[in-house]
Amino acid sequence: MLTPCQIAQRPSPLYIIAQTVSMAPTVGVDPYAALGVLIEGAVQTLVQHIPPERQAEAAATLVELLAERLDAHGLTDGDR
C-alpha cells in the first residue's frame, strides 16, 4: 500500500495521459489511429461520465474547443 507521501509524489492521471499522447508518434503509433482513439475517448467520456442533462452542452463545448484549437494552428479557414 502506498503512503500519503508516495501518493502525493505521483504524477496526476491527466499528466500521464498528456505525456502518453505526446510521445505516441515517437514510439510508432499510427497518427490516424491515435486521432481516432482520442476522439472515441472524448465521446466515451461524455457518454459515460457526464450527467445526461449536461451532455449536449458538454458536446457543444468540445466541438467549439476543437474548432478553436484547429483555428489557432491554421488548420481551418476560421469561418464557422
Image: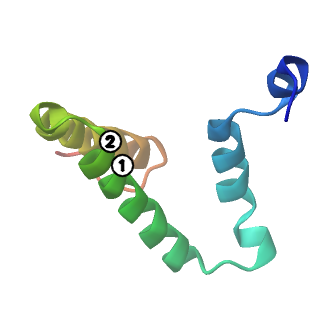
Residue at image position (89%, 18%) is 5
Looking at the rendered structure, the secondary structure element under dot 1 is helix
Answer few, some or many: residues within 10 Å of disc 1's Cα (few below 14, many 20 plus, some between 14 and 19). Answer: few
Instruction: Where is residue 66? Give x, y as percent.
Output: 35, 46
Residue 63 makes an appearance in the image = yes
Instruction: Where is residue 29? Give x, y as percent.
Output: 67, 77
Instruction: Where is residue 18? Give x, y as percent.
Output: 65, 46
Answer few, some or many: residues within 10 Å of disc 2's Cα (few below 14, many 20 plus, some between 14 and 19). Answer: few
**In the image, residue 36 above or below residue 59:** below
**In the image, residue 78 above or below residue 35:** above
Colour pattern: rainbow
Residue 54 occupies quadrant: top left
User: Which of the numbered marks, if any, corresponds to residue 49?
Assistant: 2
Residue at image position (27%, 37%) is 50
Q: For this view, does 72 lie left or right of residue 76?
A: right
The reply to whether the C-beta atoms of the residues labelled 1 and 2 are less than 8 Å apart is yes
Looking at the rendered structure, the secondary structure element under dot 2 is helix
Q: For this view, does 15 lie left or right of residue 46?
A: right
Looking at the figure, which quarter contains the C terminus?
top left
Front residue of 17/51: it is 51
Looking at the figure, which quarter contains the N terminus?
top right
Residue at image position (29%, 42%) is 62
Q: Residue furthest front?
A: 1
Q: Label 2 amino acid? A: His
Front residue of 9/62: it is 9
Residue 67 makes an appearance in the image = no
Residue at image position (42%, 58%) is 41
Q: Label 1 amino acid? A: Thr
Residue under pointer 1: 45
